[in-house]
Image (spheres, rainbow, N blue to C red):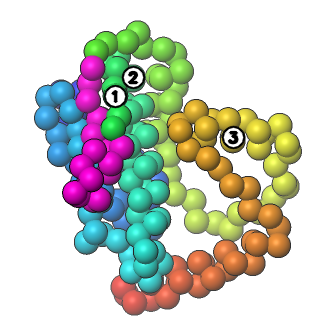
Amino acid sequence: MPATTEAADIARYAPSIHDSQPWRWRVSETSLDLYTDHRRRLGITDPDGRLAILSCGAALHHARIALAAEGREARVVRLPDPGDPGHLARVDIVGSIPVAPEAMRRIQTVRTRHTDRRPVTGTRLDDHTLAAITAAVGGEGASLHILPRDKVVELAAVSYAQQTEAAEQA
């Protein structure tokens, strides 16, 4: 199986809003193109498609991890076609790289991920842990906004929307 096909297959393990997997891949021998699949977007939970885009970002991340674990150097071009906003990324294999132990650890972790919909409870993360998470996010070219405690109530609205969405689909 070509490395690009394997990468697209591994990307299906990516977390997505209600496991909707709102992406599709176009695969060739040396590249992958990631597109938003608007048919899989959840209208009530995600009216503007933002969560679908985040889900696609997780799939892109997992595809990159798969390529690194295969010893493939990947170059990512985000939004490669200004005329097609649904074409989110193009991943080109541009060479070979040594397979790092970290890449193998990550690919094993990807394969064991599962959805856990239990309420999030527990102790607050310490500053060191938050800094490590923020650094990891920054290493992926993204940023992380830490939600203040007073904004947590707003998350209840999202939960309500998710319950409504689920009831409509039943």
* Residue assigned mark 3: 133
Q: Within 10 Å of the Cα at label 2, are there few (<14), some (14-19), or many (20+) other Cα atoms?
A: many
Image position, residue 114 (x, y; %): 50, 52
**Given this view, does label 2 or label 3 mark the residue nearer the observer?**
3
Residue 22 in the image: x percent, y percent? Answer: 33, 62
Residue at x-position 69% and y-position 41%: 134
Residue identifier under label 1: 75
Pointer 2: what residue?
A: 69
Residue 155: give x, y in percent of width and height.
Answer: 67, 75
Label placed on residue 90: none
Whether residue 70 is in magenta: the answer is no
The kind of residue on which mark 2 rests is: Ala
Q: Give the amino acid at mark 1.
A: Arg
Nearer-N-terminus badge (2/3): 2
Q: Quadrant of the N terminus?
A: top left
Q: Quadrant of the C terminus?
A: bottom left
- Disc 3 marks a residue whose amino acid type is Ile
Instruction: Name the residue located 27 percent from the left edge and 40 percent from the top edge.
Output: 90
Looking at marks 3 and 1 on the same chain, the residue that comes earlier in the sequence is marked by: 1
- Real-space Cα separation, disc 2 to disc 1, in angstroms: 15 Å
Above or below for 93 versus 15: above
